[in-house]
Amino acid sequence: MWSNNGTFLRELHADFGIAGVLLVPFLLGLMNTWLWFKFYEEKRLVVFALLVFLYVIIGFSFLLMVTRFIYWTVGLILTLLSIPVLEKIATLVHRLKT
């Protein structure tokens, strides 16, 4: 099965050399692990949203660089901006029910 392994790592190598190929995936995995444990402890939606968007980077990394698309960036920004509003609405609805 054909896949384009070079997209993610090739661009890192072109910009940062071997250090970029070694450090960026390591830091991405480290950040995902940290967010996973933070979400496990706190159960915050903002942390979960960041975790999901970072897993999208990992999931698509063997095909393409997802962060280059405006859909990924706009989706992340709108999700992070809408979470506090939705939490406020959920709190108000919960108060009205009780």
Image (cartoon, helix red, strand yellow):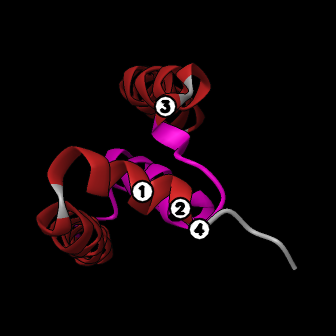
Q: Which amino acid, by three-letter code, is at mark 3?
A: Arg
Q: Position of residue 33 (x, y in %)?
A: 27, 77
Q: In the image, is residue 78 part of the stretch drawn in magenta? A: no
In this view, the mark in front (4 or 3): 4
- Dot 2 and dot 4 residues touching (CB under 8 Å): yes
Q: Which amino acid, by three-letter code, is at mark 1?
A: Arg
Q: Whole-Å distance between the Cαs marked 2 and 1?
A: 5 Å
Left/right placement of residue 80 relative to residue 23 reads right
Q: Secondary structure at mark 3?
A: helix
Q: Which mark is residue 5?
A: 4
So how many labels did they put on this image?
4
Residue to which mark 3 is pinned? 68
Q: Earlier in the sequence, mark 3 or mark 2?
A: 2
- Dot 4 and dot 3 residues touching (CB under 8 Å): no
Q: Earlier in the sequence, mark 4 or mark 3?
A: 4
- Dot 2 and dot 1 residues touching (CB under 8 Å): yes
Q: Position of residue 14 (x, y in %)?
A: 29, 48
The stretch in magenta equals 42-67
Residue to which mark 2 is pinned? 6
